[in-house]
Image: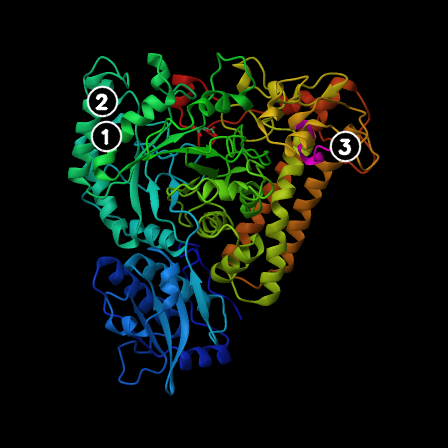
Amino acid sequence: MVLKNEDGYELWLRYNLIEDEELLASYRQQVTHIKFNANTPIEAAAQAELERGLDGLLGPEQDWIEKPSLNGAVVCGTPTSSGFIDTLDLKELASVGDEGYVIKRHKMDVHTINVIAANTDKGLLYGVFAFLRLLQTHQSLDGLHIVSAPKVKLRMLNHWDNLDGTIERGFAGHSLWDWHKLPHFISPRYTDYARACASIGLNATVLTNVNANALILTEPYLHKVAALAEVFRPYGVQVFLTARFSAPMEIGGLSTADPLDADVAAWWKDKVDQIYNILPDFGGFVVKANSEGQPGPHDYGRIHADGANMLADALEPHGGICIWRAFVYDADVKEDRFKQANSQLVPQDGTFKKNALLQVKNGPIDFQPREPHHPLFGAMPKTPLMLEVQITQEYLGFATHLVYLAPLFKETLNADTYCDGAGSIVARVVDGSLDGHDMSGMAAVTNIGDDRNWCGHPFAAANWYAYGRLAWDYELSSEQIADEWLRMTFSNDEQFVKTAIKMMIDSREAVVKYMMPLGLHHIFEVGHHYGPGPWVDGIRPDWTAVYYHQADAESVGFDRTATGSDAVSLYNPPYRDQLANVDSCPENMLLWFHHVPWDYRMKSGRTLWDEMCLMYQEGVDDVRQMQQTWQSLEGKIDTARYKHVSDLLMVQEREARWWRDACITYFQSFHGKPIPDGVEPPEHDLDYYRSIVHYYVPGIPERRFGKIGSN
Ligand code: BDP
């Protein structure tokens, strides 16, 4: 059978007719009609989605209009919106809060109904999407009983979108937000974006780049923002904006942005009042300050908490929050960049206002293929810490490489901070349970653009999906999430799903191996971060590669033990001790923490140099394996998407070789040791790799080069 070509626009919400006839017949018996009296816009959206989903999955010839017999009904409601749900007296609702839901098959005399219930309309919306997911992934409805609630409150996307339509680190086209035509033209895509977010439980979005433009806070733009918020509201997606700290000067005519200046505080208060006037359910601000050239409280001799608290004060009367980013480091500070956020922020623990949160990247440097968890987690018990991850693959091969990120996200979430004994994992810091915080959240830098398939690579949407699912429930396994996504996105063919899951799971380790094995980090080409640049030097040190790998004729790696920068001391024992000792430091993080001789003996018995070369080779081999795996799946999905992936895998293989050869020739130039057997000899010499230049690489708006240099 030839499958109809698809372009990926539908994402995981395809709702194609269930092809397995037996299953279709049984679903049609179990799901016969909908009993749903929508009372709110969110409930109306949920009802429309349910009808749309069932139309597609079970066939449009079905008629979902309420029937006299209850058998097979999908009964949806909250105890307040539906008398029927109220009479069911569902005890489980007590445990699902205001966003969770209950789905169950419920027997009533001779009838069995499908119940989707929640305490609020929003919970109901999530319940509807979860119910559809069960059908999309061919789950049995027999004995169904699901009680689900999100583990963190704010489940947020961060768009690094500029007002000129470019996206910082965006590799899937231009911004979705058509600022020029807003608020008048409302693209249907905005609704589909919100549907996709809601389907995985995301409830907040930051529309603008953290390298912020104050214009977004001017009235004309606020009306554009409000128009987007109106589309997102029925899907429970709340809008946030980034606030440029110097806005009082740039658009307010003040001569200072000092957070302790009364006029500045008053200006922000007025600005916030104006925002809420235009957009009553505005979420609040996300702020990048005193980092990579952005303005901030340090410009006036103040501290981060001064800045965050001023904004939090302005937002507080409206129920808004201020999210302050912990990605702070300074070129003029000589301290290891790894340590700077802790040095700056830990002393301020306990001084932030109640409606302020700190947003902390998963690792201490910057979204590398592998990083140790950020040592701020576990070090600021009095402050709610949000986790920030990056879905867009700035350091993972852009939208060209197939890399499934759930294992990376979970590695951080499961990392033990030991801040309150064993088991104090990052996830428990983030969900607020460890330190008793009411506010909690996760944020992710998106990979979404206006490419027809949203995220560029046909597999890149898996990372948007996985992030949402993990923000809802970080205990889900990477395999389960991949399984769901593959079934909904491509096919329920068991062989396809089984084979593709393995390819996805293995893809993260592959990229670590062919880019930066054994704990090498930040050895990208400067600025755009496309491809290898282990030789990068001559700019501010903390943006060079040589700062991070410290290679010389004898050894390589960053000594972060007591004999070096002592960043290990930021971690709690026993993890600290494990890292500090070269013999117990996990080998996949060795060069993050140790400066070791090239002939250091690895656990395998090989020298570090040989092991490094072999790892690079393994990374290339892994990509070749992915190619073969994908070839074995030809015919199981439509040709268009099959070919798109195989073409990109070809690029990925070529680039994996580029990484291997560039890095091996570079590091070899320090010591001249031979490349071990089993590693393909580099195609070119080092000069060749060093001379490669790429122009107009996506994701790096040109103005950044001119204005603030480039990292
Ligand atoms: C780095 C990016 C840069 C961002 C910065 C940030 O290279 O473009 O502005 O992070 O998170 O990863 O603020």
Q: Quadrant for residue 373, please give it.
A: top right
Secondary-structure class at tag 1:
helix
Is 411 left or right of 87, judged from the image as shown?
A: right
Q: Which label belongs to residue 314?
A: 1
Identified by mark 1, the residue type is: Ala
Secondary-structure class at tag 2:
helix
Label 2, label 3: how far apart the Cα atoms are: 62 Å
- How packed is label 2: few (under 14 Cα within 10 Å), some, or many (20 or more)? many
Label 3, label 1: how far apart the Cα atoms are: 61 Å
Residue 670: x %, y % from top left: 74, 18
**Residue 315 in sight in this render:** yes
* Foreground residue among 554 and 329: 329
Ligand 1 within 8 Å of the CB at mark 2: no
Secondary-structure class at tag 3:
loop
Identified by mark 3, the residue type is: Pro
Identified by mark 2, the residue type is: Ala
* Foreground residue among 363 and 13: 363
Label 2, label 1: how far apart the Cα atoms are: 8 Å
**Residue 658 in sight in this render:** no
Q: Are marks 3 and 1 in contact (CB under 8 Å)?
A: no
Q: Are marks 2 and 1 in contact (CB under 8 Å)?
A: yes
Front of the two marks 3 and 1: 1
Is 268 left or right of 24, judged from the image as shown?
A: left
Read off the residue under disc 2. 265
Q: Which label belongs to residue 681?
A: 3
Q: Which residues are magenta?
A: 583-591
Residue 630 highlighted magenta (yes or no): no
